[in-house]
Image (tube, rainbow, N blue to C red):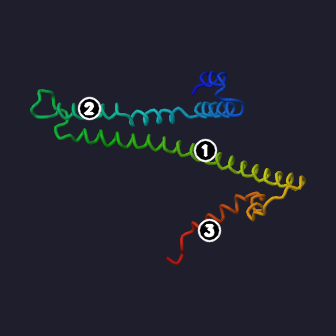
Amino acid sequence: MDSAAMEKRQDNGWIKGVVARNIQALLDRQRSEQARVPVGVRLADRVTRFTGSLGFVLLQLLVVIGWIVCNLPSTPFPKFDRHFIVLAMVASVEAIFLSTFVLITQNRMSERSAKRADLDLQVSLLAEHEVTQLIALVRAIAARLEVKVEHDPELAELEKDVEPEQVLDLLEKHEAPDVDQ
């Protein structure tokens, strides 16, 4: 969604305040990141996008069929590849380059995915900390107002901040392969 469309929806009351600001920040960030992408990587993205299309498949099909028809003994065209060795070589070189373009694009997508995962983790940790603080605040308010709260053994645990390092250590411990096997 472009900025103009988003502003129109905002005016209609669809998006308000923080949500609109967050969406705009994400759009601005995407534009900024796209502007910093080197020309070669953008070219690789375009090639990958085109080669992953039905138009490319049809073009390839037409070229190969045309090549074969031109080189058949029964056609009147001049024969330039009677045994289709050149066709095989061209196809192989094309496959090498296309594979490289796809790998460049996949590497870039992987980097973007890792950045998003890091952002998700940071937001989740912040939300967890905020919820922990809210639980403590609500308990303090309840105590001050002398509101009886049913004893929940998990509540005391929920009031403590999660230590990400401890969670990661525990996950790694459980994911570690058995040495005995």
Q: Would residue 50 be found to the left or right of residue 139 on screen?
A: left
Instruction: Using the image, tell me which numbered label, if any, was put on residue 58.
Output: none
Give the residue at x 15% y 27%: 77
Would you call the spot at circle 2 few (<14 residues within 10 Å), some (14-19), or many (20 or more)? few
Query: Tag 3: Cα neighbours inside 10 Å, few (<14), some, or many (≥20)?
Result: few
Could you tell me how many numbered marks the image carries? 3
Mark 1 or 2, which is nearer the eye? 1
User: Secondary structure under badge 1?
Assistant: helix
Give the alpha-carbon distance from disc 3 to disc 2, as whole Å. 55 Å
Identify the secondary structure beneath mark 2.
helix
Quarter of the figure with residue 148: bottom right
What mark, if any, has residue 63 been given in the picture? 2
Q: In this view, does 102 lie to the left or right of 36?
A: left
- Residue 116's disc is 1
- Image quarter of residue 23: top right
Kind of residue at badge 2: Val
Q: Residues within 10 Å of mark 1 (few under 14, many from 20)?
A: few
The residue sitting at 26% across, 42% down in the picture is: 88
| Residue located 57% across and 28% down the image | 1
Q: Where is residue 40 in the image (x, y as percent from the top left)?
A: 50, 34
Residue 52, image x, y percentages: 39, 37
Residue 156 at x, y percent in the picture = 78, 62
Up/down of 69 relative to 162, above or below: above
Q: Tell whether 106 sits left or right of 55.
A: right
Q: Which amino acid does label 3 sit on?
A: Lys
Amino acid identity at mark 1: Arg
Q: Residue 173 carries which label?
A: 3
